[in-house]
Image (cartoon, rainbow, N blue to C red):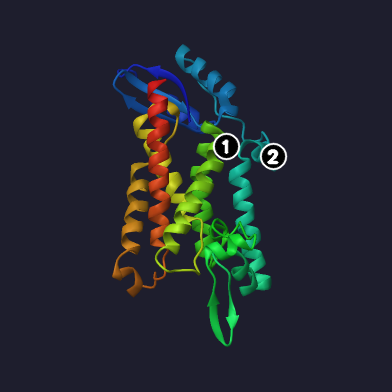
C-alpha cells in the first residue's frame, strides 16, 4: 500500500470511503496518533483517487461511474512485469502439479529433497551430499514446488499471491526471490532433519512471507505493508493446530510442520532486519 494523505481525526470520512468504493479504488484508512491516514492499494489508480479527493475536499457531489463504461481488460504482461518472481513461482508450481498428473511418481522422485527409488523391492533413499555430488543441486529447494492435491495447491498459491505481490510491489523482485530461496531451503532442510524425505509444498515460504509482511506492517507502518490481524492469528493458529495429535485424528496428518516453522523464522528474521533499516531511514 502507498500512503496518500493525512486527514484530521475530527473529519468524517464516510462519504469519501463510499465514493472510493463506488469507483472501485482499493484503499484503506487507518487511525494513527496524528490523524487518519489514507492508503492506496494500486498506484495505477492514483489519478482517479486524486480526482475523487479533490471533489470531496470541495464539497462537490461525486457521481458514480457510468455502468455502461467498459472495464479495461486485464493483461498478463503488466502483471508479470510488476510481479515476476511471484508469478514465476506460481507458474512453476502449476507446471509441476500438471507434470505429476501425467508422469506421477517419476516427478516426485526427481524433485524430492534426496534421490529415491525402488531397489530389491524396497524403497532406497539417498542423501543430500550424494545428490549434490551427482550434480543434482536443485534438490534442497525443489520440494517447495511439489503439491499433493488440489486443496494443497490452491491454498498455498492463494497465500503466495496475497503476500508475494506486496513484497514485490513495495520491496522489489530481488527481496521476493531472497525470501523464496532462503525460506524454501530453511523449511526443506528443517523438515529433512526430522528424517522425512517425501514432503513438499510452498507453505514454508508462505509462512515466511506472512512473518515478513506482518513485522514490516507493525514495525514500519509507513512502508505500506498490511495484513489483517485476524489472518495472522488464523495462520499461526493453523500451524499450531497441525502440530497437535488432533490434526491427525480429523484427517490433517502428514503436515510438514518443521517446514512451516523454519520458513516462519526466516520471515521474522528478515522482517525484523529490514523493518529496523526502514525505521532508521
Residue 274: where, in percent of width, then height? 43, 32
Q: In this view, does 115 lie to the left or right of 155?
A: right
Q: Residues within 10 Å of mark 2 (few under 14, many from 20)?
A: few
CB contact under 8 Å: marks 2 and 1? no
Q: Is residue 125 visible?
A: yes
**What is the residue that sits farthest to the top in this orientation?**
58
Q: Residues within 10 Å of mark 1 (few under 14, many from 20)?
A: few
Residue 94: where, in percent of width, then height? 62, 58
Dot label at residue 73: 2
At a point 32% along the width and 24% down the height, the residue shown is: 32
Residue 150 occupies which quadrant of the picture?
Answer: bottom right
Q: In this view, does 66 lie to the left or right of 229?
A: right
At a point 61% along the width and 61% down the height, the residue shown is: 133
Residue sitting nearer the eye, 25 or 208? 208
Residue 96: where, in percent of width, then height? 63, 62
Residue 204 occupies which quadrant of the picture?
Answer: bottom left
Q: Can residue 24 be seen in this view?
A: no
Q: How many labels does the image show?
A: 2
Residue 248 occupies which quadrant of the picture?
Answer: bottom left
Please give the residue where the numbered disc 1 appears in the rendered image.
Answer: 174
N-terminal of the pair, mark 2 or mark 1, is 2
Quarter of the image with the C terminus is top left
Q: Is residue 106 left or right of residue 153?
A: right
Q: State the SS at label 2.
A: loop
273 over 118 or under it: above or below: above
**What is the residue that sits farthest to the bottom in this orientation?**
121
Q: State the SS at label 1.
A: helix
Marks 2, 1: nearer the viewer: 1
Residue 240: where, in percent of width, then height? 31, 58
At a point 50% along the width and 33% down the height, the residue shown is: 26
Amino acid at each position: 500500500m502507498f500512503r496518500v494523505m493525512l486527514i484530521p481525526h475530527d473529519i468524517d470520512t464516510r462519504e469519501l470511503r463510499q465514493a472510493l468504493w463506488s469507483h472501485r479504488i482499493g484503499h484503506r484508512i487507518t487511525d494513527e496518533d496524528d490523524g487518519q491516514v489514507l492508503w492506496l492499494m494500486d498506484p495505477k489508480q492514483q489519478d482517479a483517487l486524486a480526482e475523487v479527493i479533490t471533489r470531496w475536499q470541495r464539497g462537490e457531489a461525486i457521481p458514480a461511474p457510468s455502468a455502461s463504461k467498459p472495464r479495461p481488460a486485464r493483461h498478463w504482461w503488466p502483471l508479470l512485469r510488476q510481479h515476476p518472481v511471484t508469478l514465476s513461482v506460481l507458474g512453476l508450481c502449476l507446471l509441476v502439479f500438471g507434470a505429476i498428473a501425467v508422469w506421477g511418481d517419476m516427478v516426485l522422485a526427481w524433485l524430492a529433497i534426496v534421490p529415491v527409488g525402488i531397489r530389491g523391492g524396497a524403497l532406497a533413499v539417498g542423501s543430500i551430499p550424494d545428490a549434490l555430488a551427482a550434480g543434482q543441486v536443485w534438490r534442497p529447494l525443489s520440494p517447495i514446488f511439489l503439491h499433493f492435491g488440489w486443496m494443497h495447491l490452491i491454498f498455498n498459491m492463494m497465500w503466495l499471491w496475497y503476500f508475494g505481490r506486496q513484497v514485490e510491489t513495495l520491496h522489489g523482485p530481488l527481496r521476493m526471490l531472497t525470501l523464496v530461496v532462503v525460506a524454501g531451503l530453511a523449511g526443506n532442510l528443517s523438515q529433512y532433519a526430522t528424517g522425512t524425505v517425501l514432503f513438499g509444498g510452498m507453505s514454508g515460504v508462505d509462512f515466511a512471507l506472512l512473518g515478513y509482511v506482518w513485522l514490516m506492517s507493525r514495525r514500519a507502518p509507513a512502508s505500506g505493508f498490511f495484513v489483517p490481524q485476524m489472518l495472522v492469528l488464523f495462520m499461526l493458529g493453523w500451524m499450531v493446530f497441525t502440530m497437535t495429535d488432533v490434526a491427525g485424528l480429523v484427517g490433517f496428518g502428514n503436515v510438514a510442520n518443521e517446514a512451516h516453522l523454519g520458513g516462519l523464522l526466516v520471515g521474522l528474521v528478515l522482517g525484523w532486519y529490514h523493518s529496523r533499516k526502514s525505521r532508521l531511514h
